Amino acid sequence: MFQVNQGQPILIVDDNDDDVEAALRAFKRTNLKNKIVRAATGAEAIAMLRERKVQPGLILLDLNMPGLDGRRVLAILKGDDELRKIPIVVLTTSADERDIDECYQLGANTYIQKPVDLDGLFAAVQRLKDYWFEIALLPRER
């Protein structure tokens, strides 16, 4: 078993430039040293992972994207024998119970509603960092 470590990149799958920029600022503020890789679409994320252009220790996934949305990306990744072990944190504006239930049914590891203000985002990212990078033990990558 291992923890997500400083050498593993984090893949952010989000089409919103402002949300990505805010997340990057929050990661910097929490002194997270991991490389951040962005996929602006679900299709781009799937291609990057299948072609092994990135081997993330954690994926932050937005649900509401045009084209291949986060729900479908989640279903594809959790249905893939090689990719299903990567922890996926759904980070989205939706607090709809149907979305929450569906994401957990599809295999999401965590579901977080995006805070509306920057201070809330900083606090959420700090807790995310504390849990995934210091507490959680995950299966080893083979």
Image: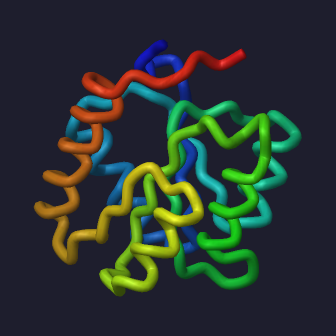
Task: Judge whether 40 appears above or below 131 on screen.
Answer: below
Q: What residue is rendered at 60% in x and 79% in y?
A: 65
Q: Where in the figure is residue 74, as x and y percent of width and height? A: 63, 61
Q: Where in the figure is residue 1, as x and y percent of width and height? A: 48, 13
How is the rendered protein coloured?
rainbow
Q: Where in the figure is residue 43, as x and y percent of width and height? A: 79, 65
Q: What residue is rendered at 22% in x and 36% in y?
A: 30
In the depicted view, which residue is nearer to us: 117 or 113? 113
Q: What residue is rendered at 54% in x and 31% in y?
A: 57
Q: Is residue 29 left or right of residue 77?
A: left
Q: Where in the figure is residue 111, as x and y percent of width and height? A: 37, 62
Task: Judge whether 47 appears above or below 28 on screen.
Answer: below
Residue extending farthest to the right is 51
Query: How many numbered marks does the figure carry?
Result: 0
Task: Judge whether 74 appears above or below 47 on screen.
Answer: below
Question: In which quadrant of the rendered view does residue 142 lie?
Answer: top right
Q: Is residue 77 left or right of residue 101?
A: right
Task: Judge whether 31 appears above or below 26 on screen.
Answer: above
Q: What residue is rendered at 75% in x and 59% in y?
A: 76
In the depicted view, which residue is nearer to us: 37 or 77? 77
Residue extending farthest to the front is 105
In the depicted view, which residue is nearer to us: 9 or 96? 96
